[in-house]
């Protein structure tokens, strides 16, 4: 499992990633004012991206991002077990209060979609077992929440993630950047739900 940590303020741990202290609120949906630690996940069998952010008083802070990887030559059940164990390690390390998972997008490759669906199932199982509330977002919903346009290109998404987290460069690999976008999306939707309840 490869990761790149940002400053973990809630636990007092330093990190290797580049992250800013605060960001200004976007003209889109604001971020939740309630303190949250959100784990975003972009599922895949070979590579599952993850991103962890803290939301404090409407500001977002990067905690960690990276990928869960499994060897291509391993049996499917072995790879799924590895994903399960690596995610549990992440949950123990970061103690997220919420989780956001990207929904499955059915493209032309049905075989790939089935494999991704299996990985998603393992992720959801591990999160449910840990008692972490889960929200799921489709790719267009994530794009809309981050850029304001549900059909945004990948380059636009990466630029906005970089801007929202005040990073010097876009997060890599792409799976990790996608996972951070999912986490940021959840922070926005939580704020929207809180506004409606008031």
Image (cartoon, rainbow, N blue to C red):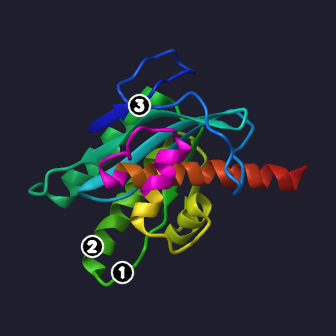
Q: Position of residue 26 (x, y in %)?
A: 67, 50
Which residue, given by chain and number where applicable, does mark 3 sit on?
18
- Label whose residue precedes the other's in the sequence (3 or 2): 3
Real-space CA distance between mark 1 and mark 2, rounded to the nearest whole angstrom: 9 Å
Residue 114 left/right relative to 54: left
In the rendered view, would you say 141 is above or below 191? below
User: Is disc 3 placed on a helix, strand or loop?
Assistant: loop
Mark 3 or mark 1, earlier in chain: 3
- Badge number at residue 112: 2
Q: Position of residue 157 (x, y in %)?
A: 47, 59
Q: Residue at x 36, y 80 (%)?
A: 107
- The picture places residue 123, in percent across and down from the top left corner, at 41, 52
Q: Helix, strand or loop at disc 2?
A: helix
Name the image quarter holding residue 171: top left
Q: Residue at x 57, y 58 (%)?
A: 146
Report the residue that reaches farthest toward the front.
168
Depth order, front residue of 112/84? 112
* Callouts 1 and 2 close, C-beta under 8 Å: yes
- Number of marks present in the image shown: 3
Which residue was labeled with disc 1?
Answer: 107
For disc 3, the neighbor class at 10 Å (few under 14, some 14 to 19, many from 20) is some
Q: Residue furthest bottom?
A: 108
For numbered disc 1, what is the local secondary structure? Answer: loop
Q: Quadrant of the N terminus?
A: top left
Local packing at callout 2 (Cα closer than 10 Å; few below 14, some 14-19, many 20+) is some
The segment highlighted magenta reads: 158-175
């Amino acid at each position: 499992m490869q990761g790149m940590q940002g400053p973990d303020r809630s636990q007092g741990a330093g990190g290797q990633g580049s992250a800013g202290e605060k960001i200004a609120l976007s003209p889109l949906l604001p971020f939740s004012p309630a303190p949250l630690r959100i784990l975003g996940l972009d599922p895949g069998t070979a590579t599952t991206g993850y991103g962890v952010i803290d939301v404090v008083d409407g500001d977002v802070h990067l905690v960690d991002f990276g990928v869960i990887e499994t060897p291509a030559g391993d049996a499917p059940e072995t790879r799924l077990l590895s994903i399960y164990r690596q995610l549990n390690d992440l949950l123990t390390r970061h103690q997220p209060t919420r989780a956001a998972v990207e929904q499955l997008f059915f493209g032309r490759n049905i075989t790939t979609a089935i494999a991704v669906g299996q990985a998603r199932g393992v992720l959801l199982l591990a999160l449910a077992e840990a008692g972490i509330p889960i929200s799921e977002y489709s790719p267009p919903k994530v794009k809309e929440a981050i850029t304001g346009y549900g059909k945004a290109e990948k380059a636009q998404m990466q630029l906005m993630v970089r801007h929202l987290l005040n990073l010097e460069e876009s997060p890599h690999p792409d799976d990790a950047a996608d996972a951070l976008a999912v986490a940021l999306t959840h922070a926005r939707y939580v704020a929207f739900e809180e506004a409606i309840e008031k």
